[in-house]
Amino acid sequence: MSAEEAKKSVKDRIRFSAFTTAEIVMMAMLAAANGVLTLYISPVNQLLNGLGGPIATSTITGLYMLYGMLACYLIRKPGTAVITFGIGAVVQSFMGSAYGIPSAFAAAACYMVVAEAVFAVFRYRKWGMAQMMLAGGALVPIWFYFAARMFGYMKWGGDILALALVVRIASGIVLSGILSKLVGDALVKSGLLRRFAAAKSTLEG
């Protein structure tokens, strides 16, 4: 196979399509909704921390990633995670983040890189429950590594850190992976998202 044929083969596997206005608006809306949601999650997070410490707060980790995963599921184009999580970090910065602006951008960077990598493995073509669960769980470890150093999690000790990571991955699988697919499917069935890839895939299927 020649170099040109190889390049063409790669392009055929992952086609980079321009985003439509509707898709850009959707990404912005989800990012904005996440900014509002984060304001309400922060007090809940503090309450859980008081009740059960780091393990309890780890149970809702998946909610912080839901908006980006939902955007990826609905739009199904390379770059969706980068744009959505990027906008999300900017929105959180303007609205105010209980964890600080640097952490908002650091978390977004970790999420977008991992999400794009996972969906690229499936060539942005497979969006079943298994793929969404895998992505939801995969988004957790890298950010947890950096968060542990930014917020002093290292003082918890090895056992607590390991358990917190397991709980966070489970939360990512359920509240990010599974929930984003369920919500996405419900939105598709409502008939409001006919222009999006998720709806078109359902009709073709």
Image (spheres, grey):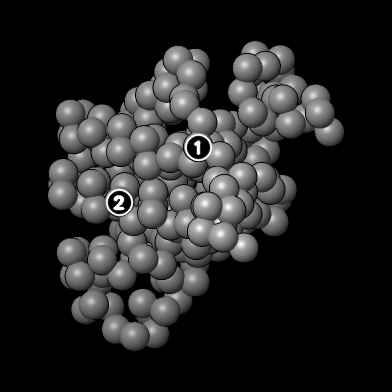
Q: Residue furthest front?
A: 2
Marks 1 & 2, CB-CB < 8 Å contact: no
The alpha-carbon separation of the residues under discs 1 and 2 comes to 20 Å
Q: Nearer the viewer, residue 115 or 37?
A: 115
Q: Which mark is residue 109?
A: 2
Q: Nearer the viewer, residue 75 or 138?
A: 75
Q: Judge whether 121 appears above or below 148 on screen.
A: above
Q: Is residue 80 visible?
A: yes
Q: Quadrant of the N terminus?
A: bottom right
> Residue 27 in the image: x percent, y percent?
43, 27
Left or right of residue 150, residue 125 in this image: right
> Residue 159 in the image: x percent, y percent?
39, 85
Amino acid at the residue labelled 2: Ala
Left or right of residue 136, residue 54 in this image: left
Of labels 1 and 2, earlier in sequence is 1
* Residue at the image position 26 percent from the left and 30 percent from the top: 91
Amino acid at the residue labelled 1: Phe
Q: Residue furthest bottom?
A: 158
Give the secondary structure at mark 1: loop
Q: Residue furthest right?
A: 205
* Residue at the image position 37 percent from the left and 79 percent from the top: 160
Q: Nearer the viewer, residue 188 or 53?
A: 188
Q: Quadrant of residue 2?
A: bottom right
Q: Which residue is mark 1?
A: 16
Q: Judge whether 24 appears above or below 174 on screen.
A: above
* Residue at the image position 46 percent from the left and 50 percent from the top: 116
Q: Is residue 38 visible?
A: no
Q: Quadrant of the C terminus?
A: top right
Give the secondary structure at mark 2: helix
